[in-house]
Amino acid sequence: MPLPGEPIAAIATPVGVGALAVVRISGDGVHGIADRIFRKPDGNAGTLAGSAGYTAHFGRLYDGPQLIDEVIALVFRAPHSFTAEDMVEFTCHGGPVVVQQVLKLLLDSGCRLAEPGEFTRRAFLNGRIDLLQAEAIGEMIHARSESAWRTAVSQMKGDLSEKLDGLRESLLRSCALLELELDFGEEDVEFQSREELALQVEELQGEVGRLVDSYQHGRIASEGVATVIAGRPNAGKSTLLNTLLGQERAIVSHMPGTTRDYIEECFIHDRTMFRLTDTAGLREAGGEIEHEGIRRSRMKMAEADLMLYLFDISSGNLDEEIDDIRRIHTEHPCARFIAVANKTDRAASAEMAIGRVHHESGAEVIGISALEGKGIDTLKQRMGELVRDLDKLHEASVLVTSLRHYEALRNAADALRNARELIDHHADTELVAFELRSALDYVGEITGRVVNEEILNTIFSRFCIGK
Ligand code: GDP
C-alpha cells in the first residue's frame, strides 16, 4: 500500500536555458493543488483532479491574475506513477527564471521543496522499485560511459535483484528448517540432514562468491579502470595527465612536489574508460600537506587496476629508477604495470636506455614525450590491451557495481563460510542458524528488504533534487 505523502515539488530538468523544462509534484492532493493554479485555454479553471491518469492537458499557470507560463500538465494517478502517488508533471518553457517562477508558485500553493532523491525514495518506500533499482537510476543519470550506462540499465531492469531474491529464497528455506528444529527444543530432531545443509550452503557460497568476484568488472564498467600515474616529482606526471586528457587539468609547474594531492579525471579510449589519478610526488621529505598527499597516493596505488610508473629517461639517474621500478612493481602485484620513459625528446640515446631499463627491471617500458605528445598513441593502445580482460562486462551477465553491494556480499560470504565451518564441526543448530540469518540480512540489505535509515540517507542524498 502506498504511504500517504506530503505534497512535494521540484524542478526535474537541469538548470540553464533550454526549449523545455519539467517541474513535478507528487503526494496527497497534488491534483487539487494543480487545479488552483492551472487554467485551460478558454480561461476556465482546470479539472486535472477529475481527469484520468496518463492524460496531458494544455493550459496556463496563473499566480492570481498574473500569468506565469503556458504549460502541458501531465496527470498521473496513484499508484500508476513514478512515486506510486498522485503526480503532475508540468512541462514549461526552459528558461531559468520561468522555471523558478513555476516552482515558487507550486511552493506557495501548498507543496514543499523535495529533498535530493525524494521522488525516488518514495518510489522505493511505496514498493514501486527496490533499493537496487533506485540506485541504478542514480547511476544511470551519472553514467559517464556506455558501459556504465549499460550496467545501470541491467540493474534497473532488475537482473541483480532477481539473482539476490533467488539467494534470499534459498537462505530463507534453510533458516526456516533450522529454526523449526530449534522450536522443537529438547527433542533431537533434524528436518534436514546436515550433509544436505552443508551442500546447500556450499552452493550458496559459490553463488555469492561469483557475485563478489564480478565486482572488479562491475566497478570498472561503472567507474572506469583505476589508473594511477606514479613517479618522482618532475618526471612529467601532470604533463602526461594533461596530454592523456587532452586538456589542461593539473597545474604543471617546475617546483618538485607541487601536485600535493591527487587529481582524478576520466578519458575514454577505444570504449574503455580510464579513471586517471596523478599522485603527489613520492618524495619522503616535505611538509605536512605533502605527507597527507603521499599517504593518499599510496592508498590510490594500492587500489589501482593499472599503474603507469613515469620516469625521466633524460635524468641520468637510471640505476635509481630501475630500483624504483622493480620495487614498485613487486609492491603492487595486482595492478597491471607499464614503466613509462618520459622526456625522450631530451635523451640522447633514448632507445638504448629504454632497452636497458626493460632488461634490468623486467618491466614493460614504453618511451614517450609527454610534452610533445610522442608515443602517446602507443601508450594508450597498450593500456587498452592490458586491461581488456578486466573490461569484459558483456560476458558476465550480472555484475556488482557498487561498493555498498560488494561489502554486503563479502559479509554474507563470511557468514556463509562460518556457517559451513560450524556445520562441519557439528556445532549447535543455534549457532548455524545465527550465521545463516546474518547472511540473509546482508543480502536483504542490498535490495532494501532489511531497511536501514542510515543506508537510505546515504543513497538518496547522492541524488539531485527532482529525482
Ligand atoms: P610532475 O611533477 O611529475 O607532475 O611533473 P610535471 O608534469 O610538472 O613536469 C615537470 C617538468 O618537466 C615541467 O617543466 C614539464 O614541462 C617538463 N616535462 C614534462 N614532460 C616532458 C617531456 O616529455 N619532455 C620535456 N623536455 N620536458 C617535459
Image (cartoon, rainbow, N blue to C red):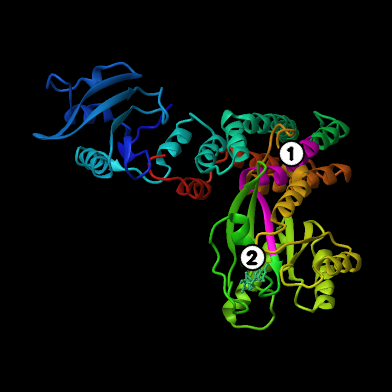
Estimate the x, y position of residue 264 in percent, counting from the top left.
58, 59
Estimate the x, y position of residue 177 in percent, counting from the top left.
74, 30
**Helix, strand or loop status at disc 1:** loop
Judging by the rendered image, the residue that carries numbered circle 2 is 371
Left or right, 37 with respect to 162, comes to left
| Magenta-colored stretch includes residue 207 | yes
Left or right, 143 with respect to 147, comes to left
Task: Point out the quarter of the image occupied by ligand 1.
Answer: bottom right
Residue at (68, 31) in percent of width and height: 163
Give the position of the N terminus as an image quadrant: top left
- Would the CB of label 2 be found within 8 Å of ligand 1? yes
**Helix, strand or loop status at disc 2:** loop
Q: Amino acid at mark 1?
A: Lys
Q: In the displayed image of the protein, which residue is found farthest to the right?
A: 359
The magenta-colored residue range is: 204-229
Q: Which mark is residue 392?
A: 1
Give the position of the C terminus as an image quadrant: top left
